[in-house]
Amino acid sequence: MTTVLFDFAWTLFASDANRWVGSAAALVGREVAVGEAHRIASDFAELLRTTATDPAHIARDLDPRVWDRAILAVLQQIRGVDLPFARALHETRREALEPYADTSSTLAALSARDIRLGVVSNVGWDIRQCFARHGLDRYIDAFVLSYEVGFVKPDVRIWRTALDALAAQPDRTLMVGDHPSGDGGSVTAGIPALVLPMVSSPAQLRGFDQVLTLAGI
């Protein structure tokens, strides 16, 4: 294996639910009931995952302006989230995104073995800032973001773009993600996929020991 591609949200990073929802609620003077922060974060994750490959929602991942409107609409589908609260949640989410407990060590271990690393994400904003904030950008050799390249997972063209960016061969590359049809779509380009079960809290281990095993580390 010479190359590993990672998805971004709920693969390498996730929102700290209490910090995210608490910060947003404070902006609008709203109380947060016990357990509500985790329910909102969980509902948001499920809504984004279930619409990720829906043709009606693909436009959000190709245009930052559409992304902002679409995410506000998704947030308002969550019970107890009105428009002002949705706006606050959208405003504070990026700062609340944290790497999983084993993200940094995994990226460092792979990079130390000269395995090239890429991030392939369906997203409508520049996620590089999250990596830079945590000092993880140094490990990533290429970011392939849907709104920049014009293709959305599982379109085979996004995988070919990633392979070209990293000068990689598909049979020596691994895709790691959380979405069976989105991230698992890498197999259409000849790239094996490791789809990990959902882990909601960034304080938890993501299960990247499986990645290291497959990489022979």
Image: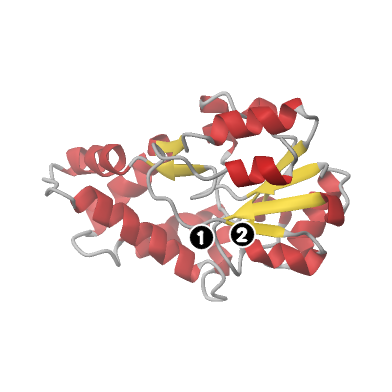
Q: Is residue 98 left or right of residue 207?
A: left
Query: Viewer-proximal residue, 198 or 147?
Result: 198
Q: Residue 187 sits in which quadrant? A: bottom right
Residue 205 image point, x, y percent: 46, 40
Q: Residue at x 56, y 47 (%)?
A: 8
Residue 139 higher or lower than 159, as above or below: above
Label 1 crowding class (10 Å Cα cut-off): few <14, some 14-19, many 20+? some
Residue occupied by mark 2: 62
Q: Residue 96 sits in which quadrant? A: top left
Residue occupied by mark 1: 66
Tell me whether circle 1 and circle 2 mark residues in contact (CB < 8 Å).
yes
Residue 139 higher or lower than 26, as above or below: above
Query: Viewer-proximal residue, 123 or 207?
Result: 207
Extreme residue toward the bottom, this view: 55
Q: Is residue 127 left or right of residue 160?
A: left
* Residue 153 appears in the figure: no
Here the colouring is secondary structure
Residue 150 image point, x, y percent: 71, 59
Residue 98 image point, x, y percent: 44, 36
